[in-house]
Amino acid sequence: MALMNQPLRVAIFADPGLPSRTVSRVLGDGNDGEKTVGRYLFSHHKSRTPARPDGTLDLDTVRGWARDDDVDLLAIVTEIPRRAGRKPKIAALHYGEGLVIISLPALGWQGVTQRLRHVLFDSLDALADQQTPGTDQHTSNSGVVYEQESRSGRSVYITSPWWRPGRLRLVLGMVRTNEPLSAVSKLSGVLAAAAGTGAFGIFYSSIWEMADALPSWRLGLITAMVIVTMVLWLIGANRLWEHSRKLGDLTEAAMYNASTVATLLLSVILLYLVLFIGILIGGIGVIESGFMSSKIGAEASLGNYVDIAWLSASMGTVAGALGSNFDSEDTIRELTHGKRLAQRFKQRQDANENNC
């Protein structure tokens, strides 16, 4: 335990990826190691907390990690969505154990670093002083505080105020932790296949004529159908759809699946935009406007180049990329909350087998 006027030792165990990087930004430490901030001496560890078969975190394992560090307080920053009934839990404080569990997705999409800083230090102050976070009205800088039952003694959790759509915020936070922008860079094979097929639109005048004949609303409808088809392919090919029997709760499965669909939609839309811009630039560079005018029977304009790129990107995505996949199996295993949860199950199973 910390001596008088000595900083309290706090071990933070953060999941790899966005949780660990956000903790690093909060503490100002680029790497694992010790960092003093105010009254606390932090040791930051990047480690995925294993999960029990019912999907809850295996806190006994983390307590063992903390005992090895001989710390005063313990913080877990996880990407696992946690709920109390219909209320998403932002944080749960266990006073008897000096433990706070923070669910990063519950902090939403924007301003995650600042929100995590508030939740973390509010919670640690409450644990250190053995007080309820916030005022007598049971509010805090982070949300609304509720008492909960716990076998380890007094425990409270913090959730969003009633006027803030906590569940929507939670799903958006899950999408954020899936990092859809990062997923685009791991679809290089899909992009190459789509680009190879879409490039035909630059060289074939029949596609110019078709693009000129199609109204914008039909080109938009084709795009929407192509993107949805690509998302469904990626979900089906990689078995990304989660069933309630695996997660134990229909609402939980719905949140996992909603975050998966939204993540892939954003990834495929971004990939489509990259493809569209590439074909547009190529078309402007290759297709001579006078030659195009002679083929389509009207004066060529920038709108014609846009329509050609629009139709070609759709053609390339559905004809070239459909059937392609992510660049590696490792990418798929880290892609969604459901896939990473399966790794937590395996992590705990392997640990139990090693201890036998």
Image: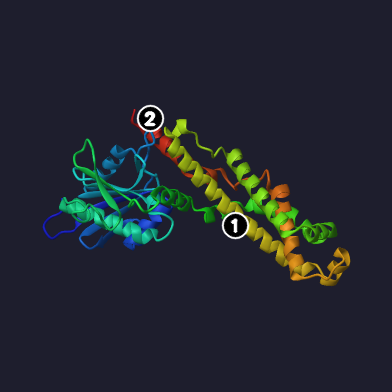
Residue shown at 23% from the left, 58% from the top: 41
Which of the two discs, 1 and 2, sits closer to the camera?
1
Q: Is residue 335 visible?
A: no
97 shown above or below 184: above
Q: In the image, 281: left or right of 184?
A: right
For the question of whether residue 322 can be seen, the reply is: yes
Question: In the image, what residue type sits under mark 1?
Answer: Leu
Which element is circle 1 on? helix
The x, y position of residue 99, in whole percent, is 24, 46
Task: Quickly name the residue at label 2.
Answer: 353
Measured as percent of width and height from the top left, residue 28 is found at 33, 63
Query: Of 67 and 161, which appears nearest the observer?
Result: 161
The amino acid marked with disc number 2 is Glu
| In the image: residue 305, left or right of residue 241 | right
Q: Is residue 143 left or right of residue 221?
A: left
Q: Secondary structure at mark 2?
A: helix
Residue at image coords 60%, 38%: 236
Where's the C terminus, which quadrant? Answer: top left
Alpha carbon distance from label 1 to label 2:
43 Å
Crowd band around label 2 with a 10 angstrom C-alpha radius: few (<14), some (14–19), many (20+) = few
| Above or below for 127 versus 291 | above
Above or below: residue 154 compared with residue 213: above
Give percent across and percent down for residue 113.
Answer: 37, 60
Label 1, on which residue?
270
